[in-house]
Image (spheres, helix red, strand yellow):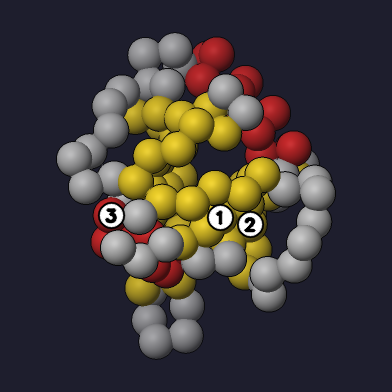
Amino acid sequence: GRVGMIFLTEHAVKKLKVLILEHPEDPIVRLMVRDLDEARLSFNITLQDKVQPDDGVQEVKGLTVAVEGRSAPRMQGITLDYQEPDGFKFIHREQEEDPKFDLFNWN
């Protein structure tokens, strides 16, 4: 299978843990991506109660992160960040070594 990789900043990890504390019945962080049009992508982040069969799943700093199967190839090199007041942001950037990011792979 194709391997994708995604990065989470410390801010994103912290905020997700807060959200899960508020919604303990939905402990899975699920990510997916959709085409809005030819130039734009829509990234979606939800909390869910269970993993779907085709999801790629990884534990990151105590979070269970699931990536929708058909979104996985599109998530290559994406960084998930969180900043007030904008909220979560998906940043697409060239891969670079950066110790602040947690790297995780799925097949």
The residue that disc 1 covers is: 6
Number of other residues with Cα within 10 Å of mark 1, as a class: few under 14, some 14 to 19, many 20 or more: many
Q: Could one spot residue 90 in this view of the protein?
A: no
The residue that disc 2 covers is: 79
Q: Residue at x 38, y 39 (%)?
A: 57
Residues at marks 1 and 2, CA–CA distance in whole angstroms: 6 Å
Name the element at disc 1.
strand
Number of other residues with Cα within 10 Å of mark 2, as a class: few under 14, some 14 to 19, many 20 or more: many
Give yes or no for contact between labels 1 and 3 (Cβ–Cβ under 8 Å): no
Dot 1 or dot 2, earlier in sequence: 1
Where residue 70 sits: x, y (%)?
27, 61
Q: Which amino acid does label 1 sit on?
A: Ile
Q: What residue type is labelled 3?
A: Gly
Residues at marks 3 and 2, CA–CA distance in whole angstroms: 18 Å
Q: Which of marks 1 and 2 is in front?
A: 1
Name the element at disc 3.
helix
Dot 1 or dot 3, earlier in sequence: 1
Q: Residue at x 75, y 67 (%)?
A: 96
Residues at marks 1 and 3, CA–CA distance in whole angstroms: 14 Å
Q: Could one spot residue 97 in this view of the protein?
A: yes
The answer to which of 59 and 27 lies nearer the viewer is 59
Name the element at disc 2.
strand
